[in-house]
Amino acid sequence: MQHTSPIQRRKSRQIHVGKVPVGGDAPISVQSMTNTETCDVDATVAQIRRMEQAGVDLVRVSVPSMEAAEAFGKIRQQVETPLIADIHFDYKIALRVAELGVDCLRINPGNIGNESRIREVVSAARDRAIPIRIGVNAGSLEKDLQKKYGEPTPEALVESALRHVEHLDRLDFQDFKVSVKASDVFMAVAAYRQLAREIEQPLHLGITEAGGLRSGTVKSAVGLGILLMEGIGDTLRISLAADPVEEVKVGFDLLKSLRLRNKGINFIACPSCSRQNFDVVATMNALESRVEDLLTPLDVAVIGCVVNGPGEAREADLGLTGGSPQHLVYVDGKPANKLTSDNLVDELEALIRSKAAEKQAKLDQLIHKN
């Protein structure tokens, strides 16, 4: 059963990245970034489509050259998800992708040249209703800030961000979001807390260069979890040295754990012990991979014994409690039927898919009524 989150989110101005609202009362969006060669249009489109299957809300694509900009235009035509172009220094690339249908520009105004160039990019963004993301990173602070602070600090990150914000303020452009990423959890958390008090725009969260799949997931969960618990954050990316699809999965798992998003199956599973009446670990490994395509929110409990099993199963949309010789299935909190260990994964998958379809039909009815 789904529960609302007790988290009170920071009030922020809402912008739109294509069809996706960011900030205000919009759900926290999950984004990732392609790691293919952008000029390889087929490979990049294929990767984005795999992210779409995982439920991604927004995708960022690096556009380092005019050749990549032309490729970006072809990519834009082939995918549904709103695309963010990641651009550094060359304002002409920003102007070109704006013409080609970009949904958001990740570009730091202060890094693209003189005032006339900034004005030209902002004008193109304004005319086409394209928001901008100011992206500050501890690894690429301006030289004078490095000299002033001696090393990256939260204060240096925020000062850098506000410099770029000032450019947009001066041109009365308010449709932007900001990130102040660092690989150090303490630095990132402190910078975001400070920035959240300084501006009203949405904040894009991330622990940059967090690490590999396991270590990066842990580091991101700690840093972003702290901020999200405090109501800070409107969109996020889990930065992993791994398949971008994993970033999407971790992002949604993080939001599900805080009850901030409900997308896909939320498994409640015991770590197993000698009380288990079926192989919980093997069952979960198989189930998770089999139902990754399901995006309907559903709580599924898989518990190996009768100690905690009935309690957890009754609280879930669908629950399994290990027993001997048969295992008891609960549906919507009530005992429904029994299963043996033979073909257990196949039968559980069928039950999950049936329950998800039933729930999705009810959700669709509510949407049509409203």
Image: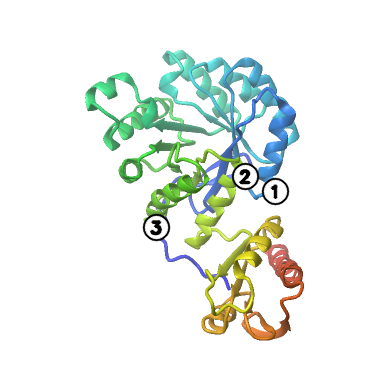
Q: Are marks 2 and 1 in contact (CB under 8 Å)?
A: yes
**Which of pointers 3 and 1 lies earlier in the amino acid sequence?**
1
> Gap between marks 2 and 3, in whole Å?
24 Å
Quadrant for the C terminus, please.
bottom right
Q: Judge by depth and name the residue closer to the eye, 123 or 117.
A: 117
* Outermost front residue: 274
Give the crowd class for mark 2: few <14, some 14-19, many >=20 residues within 10 Å: many
Residue 154 placement (x, y as % from top left): 29, 37
Q: What's under tag 1, amino acid-wise?
A: Gln
> Gap between marks 3 and 1, in whole Å?
28 Å
Disc 2 marks which residue? 245
Which corner quadrant of the image does residue 195 belong to?
Answer: top left
Residue 233 placement (x, y as % from top left): 44, 48
For the point 68% across and 45% down, which residue is it? Answer: 52
Secondary structure under tag 1 reads helix
**Which of pointers 2 and 3 lies earlier in the amino acid sequence?**
3
Q: What's under tag 3, amino acid-wise?
A: Met
138, above or below 285, in the image: above
Task: Specify whether 174 is left or right of 347.
Answer: left
Give the crowd class for mark 1: few <14, some 14-19, many >=20 residues within 10 Å: some
Query: What label does residue 229 carry, if any?
Result: 3
Give the crowd class for mark 3: few <14, some 14-19, many >=20 residues within 10 Å: some
Of badges 2 and 3, nearer the viewer stands: 2
Disc 1 marks which residue? 53
Q: Judge by depth and name the residue closer to the eye, 164 or 193.
A: 193
> Gap between marks 2 and 1, in whole Å?
9 Å
29, above or below 344, in the image: above
Residue 318 placement (x, y as % from top left): 65, 75
Of badges 2 and 1, nearer the viewer stands: 2
For the point 65% across and 16% down, which residue is it? Answer: 67
